Image: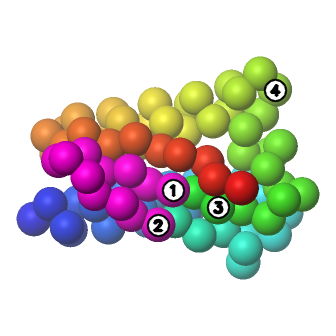
Amino acid sequence: MAALEGNRMKDLLLYIARNLVGNPDAVSVTEVEKDGELTLQLRVAPEDMGKVIGRQGRIAKEIRTLIRSYAQRTGQKVSVDIVD
């Protein structure tokens, strides 16, 4: 069940990121599970990094909030890392 929920969160993150960037084919998400916490590592094209982070990190913060609130409903601990 946890793997299924992880996939749903991964799909949600992919959906959000692909709709923000200019190069949606370059978006990828890697799942890393450590100590009972799932980390979703988001990668985008270098030229799209600013679109995902936003001014003063506002968009990145909202993405993390959305994913965290979805994870709370499933009882999981999830974090989102934006990796370059």
Q: Amino acid at mark 3?
A: Arg
Residue 36: image location, x then y, percent: 17, 47
- Quarter of the image with the C terminus in it: bottom right
- Specify which label sits upstream in the sequence, 2 or 1: 2
Q: Residue furthest top?
A: 56
Q: Is residue 9 left or right of residue 57?
A: left
Q: How far is disc 2 from disc 1 in space, using C-alphas? A: 5 Å
Q: Amino acid at mark 4?
A: Arg
Q: Amino acid at mark 1?
A: Gln
Residue picked out by circle 4: 55
Label 1: element kind: strand
For the residues bearing labels 4 and 3, Cβ distance under 8 angstroms:
no
Q: Residues within 10 Å of mark 3 (few under 14, many from 20)?
A: many
Is 83 covered by the magenta stretch? no
Residue picked out by circle 3: 43
Find residue 25 and report its image quarter: bottom right
For the residues bearing labels 2 and 3, Cβ distance under 8 angstroms:
yes
Residue 57: image location, x then y, percent: 71, 27
| Front of the two marks 4 and 3 | 3
Find residue 5 and report its image quarter: bottom left
Which residue occupies 32% across, 67% down?
7
Q: Residue furthest right?
A: 47
| Prevailing SS of the magenta stretch | strand
Residue 6 seen in render: yes
Q: How far is disc 3 from disc 1 in space, using C-alphas? A: 7 Å
Q: How far is disc 4 from disc 3 in space, using C-alphas? A: 18 Å
Q: Amino acid at mark 2?
A: Thr
- Specify which label sits upstream in the sequence, 2 or 4: 2
Residue picked out by circle 2: 30
Residue picked out by circle 1: 41
Q: How far is disc 2 from disc 3 in space, using C-alphas? A: 8 Å
